[in-house]
């Protein structure tokens, strides 16, 4: 009778051992499968991200190569001004070539929907700077190029372009100070321009009667312009005029 009880006990222990062994193997198998699936998923995500990154890098390199090719196609020894400006995913590359007062201005756009534009014009003056800003807060930039005329007067002027809904660009009209009787008294050139916030600011020193060209004695006049929509194109209009002593 005792032998029979021991046999039953041993049989029960054997069943428990077999069950636990099989259960541990099952747990190990499931853990292995989970790890394998996790590795596979990570590998797929890595390959997808890598392909996407390579695609973006390829597109970026293509644009940069195009820009470099455009720039290198210009006669390097005659370039007297070159600047690249970027805002809101649209860029402008500005180059000027030539000698003397007459220069050839080249503007190449990048990032417009559809075809980019290239503008080549002859200007009478020297480019001194260029700036970019969204002056009318429509989500697209404006490009302003500042020039001065030859001679002792160094009269300033603006060459401006505005982006139209990200698809094209059109010129901006800038009124000459000499044509505005409200602000042209005492004006004899020597302008400076700058974008302040979303306004264009023009400054120049006033000439009093009897002043020589090289020595004006009047106040500094500051004209603030805002960009508005005109009938044919956008234009600058006088928004505010200030005067203050030079010193």
Image (cartoon, rainbow, N blue to C red):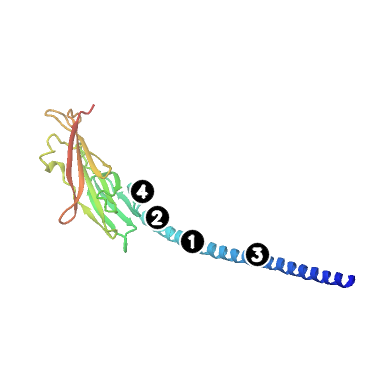
The residues bearing labels 1 and 3 have C-alpha atoms spaced at a distance of 34 Å
Residue found 15% across the figure and 41% down from its top: 177
Please tell me which of labels 2 and 1 falls first in the chain: 1
Is 168 placed left or right of 44 in the picture?
Answer: left
Please tell me which of labels 1 and 3 falls first in the chain: 3
Which of the image's four quarters has the N terminus? bottom right
Residue 210, placed above or below residue 13: above
Residue 196 point in image, percent of width and height: 27, 41
The residues bearing labels 2 and 1 have C-alpha atoms spaced at a distance of 20 Å
Specify whether residue 42 is in view: yes
Residue 148 point in image, percent of width and height: 23, 42
Please tell me which of labels 3 and 2 falls first in the chain: 3
Viewer-proximal residue among 103 and 13: 13
Please tell me which of labels 2 and 4 falls first in the chain: 2
Residue found 51% across the figure and 61% down from its top: 50
Residue labelled with disc 4? 77
Which of the image's four quarters has the C terminus? top left
Residue 68, disc: 2
Classify 10 Å Cα crowding around label 3: few (below 14), some (14-19), many (20 and above). Answer: few
Residue labelled with disc 3? 31
Residue 54, disc: 1
Name the secondary structure under disc 1. Answer: helix
């Amino acid at each position: 009778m005792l032998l029979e009880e021991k046999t039953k006990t041993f049989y029960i222990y054997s069943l428990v051992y077999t069950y636990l062994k099989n259960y541990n193997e099952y747990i190990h198998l499931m853990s292995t499968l989970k790890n394998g699936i996790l590795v596979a998923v990570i590998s797929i995500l890595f390959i997808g991200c890598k392909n996407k990154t390579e695609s973006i890098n390829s597109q970026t390199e293509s644009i940069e190569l195009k820009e470099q090719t455009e720039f290198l196609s210009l006669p390097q020894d005659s370039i007297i001004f070159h600047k690249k400006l970027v805002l809101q995913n649209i860029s402008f590359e500005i180059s000027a070539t030539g000698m003397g007062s007459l220069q050839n201005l080249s503007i190449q756009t990048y990032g417009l929907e559809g075809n980019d534009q290239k503008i080549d014009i002859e200007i009478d003056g020297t480019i001194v700077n260029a700036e970019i800003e969204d002056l009318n807060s429509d989500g697209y930039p404006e490009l302003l190029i500042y020039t001065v005329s030859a001679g002792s007067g160094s009269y300033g002027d603006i060459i401006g372009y505005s982006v139209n809904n990200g698809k094209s660009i059109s010129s901006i009209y800038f009124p000459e100070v000499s044509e505005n009787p409200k602000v042209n008294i005492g004006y004899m050139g020597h302008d400076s321009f700058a974008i302040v916030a979303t306004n264009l600011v023009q400054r120049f020193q006033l000439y009093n009667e009897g002043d020589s060209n090289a020595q004006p004695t009047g106040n500094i006049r500051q004209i603030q312009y805002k960009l508005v929509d005109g009938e044919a194109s956008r234009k600058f209009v006088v928004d505010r005029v200030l005067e203050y002593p030079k010193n």
